[in-house]
Image: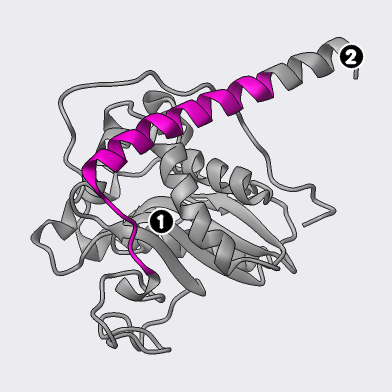
Amino acid sequence: MSSKRAFQLAEKGWRLTWYALSARHQAGRRATLSGWQADAPSAYCHRCGISAGPGSVKVEGCSYCVGRKSPWDRVVRLGSYDAPLDQWIVRMKFAQDWSWGPWLGAKLAESVGRIGQGEKAAICPVPMHWLRRWRRGYNQAELIAREISRVNKWPLAAVLRRPRLTRPQTTVSLSERLRNIQGSFDVGHVDLRGWSVWLVDDIKTTGATATACARLLRKAGAEKVYLAVAAVANPHHADFTHVEPRPTNHAASPPPAAPAGPPAHGAA
């Protein structure tokens, strides 16, 4: 590689880092003014992620998920899908306010880093179909995942793909969600044996998307699969079937593209 090319790549890396840090700062100021704080691990079920009262969660889960099979080892979240967290996620997804992505990622990185300490860990965002990503300008799960990767210095393993375009899960009935995404994901030729993989998304509702992705990571050999999300929807709320109202106004421009591939095949 020429010195000129090396300089160009280094300059691009610094520019992208500056964009992420600046965006995270902007979102952080707004969050601080709201008085919001992330939930403590004791506030939710480690197995399914829904809110739970003191002493109501056992090793096998809570009253909602006990007895149900789970393809991941545990869930880490920032909070329930309620104000103001829900509006931040809506703005990130539908109002081009992508600055929330790096900030949510930085917040998740704190909890994720404590749990994954000492493990051979990698970060994998839930993929988005290319057409939907082109329309939005970015994949919000990747924005969150990239920041977790940067903070904890773990590789970003974007090994999952979404080759089939499906209807948005929020437009499909609960009973049809698994069927809606069936066959819409696949995994690249990667050996994840010995790796603990953190699957990252913005929100968990029924868990159908995360389940499909986690199973593929297991199929690729992942020793452990964790699920890290910004928010978990409450199944007892009336809006559980449609949790993403779209705002009418628009904000910031989309972030610069910074594609990051999986760890080297030989290292995985």
Q: Which mark is residue 3?
A: 2
Q: Residue at x 29, y 88 (%)?
A: 55
> Please, is residue 266 above or below residue 144 in the view?
below
Q: Residue at x 53, y 46 (%)?
A: 145
Q: Position of residue 151 (x, y in %)?
A: 60, 46
Q: Considering depth in this image, is 86 or 185 the residue closer to the camera?
A: 86
Give the crowd class for mark 2: few <14, some 14-19, many >=20 residues within 10 Å.
few
Q: Is residue 25 left or right of residue 216?
A: left
Q: Residue at x 26, y 50 (%)?
A: 36
Instruction: Evaluate if marks 2 and 1 touch, with contact meaning CB atoms under 8 Å apart.
Output: no
SS assignment at label 2? helix
Whole-number angstrom distance, CA of label 2 to CA of label 1: 40 Å
Give the crowd class for mark 1: few <14, some 14-19, many >=20 residues within 10 Å.
many
Q: Residue at x 44, y 28 (%)?
A: 23
Q: State the scheme by which the image is colored.
A: one colour
Identify which amino acid the numbered label 1 is placed on: Val
Q: Considering depth in this image, is 260 or 22 the residue closer to the camera?
A: 22
Q: Is residue 11 left or right of residue 234?
A: right
Taking the magenta stretch, the answer to whether it contains residue 27 is: yes
Q: Is residue 87 left or right of residue 146?
A: left
Q: Is residue 44 visible?
A: no
The residue sitting at the top extreme is 4
Numbered label tally: 2
Q: Position of residue 83 (x, y in %)?
A: 18, 49
Q: Considering depth in this image, is 85 or 67 the residue closer to the camera?
A: 85
Residue highlighted by disc 1: 229
Part of the protein shown in magenta: 12-40
Taking the magenta stretch, the answer to whether it contains residue 252 is: no
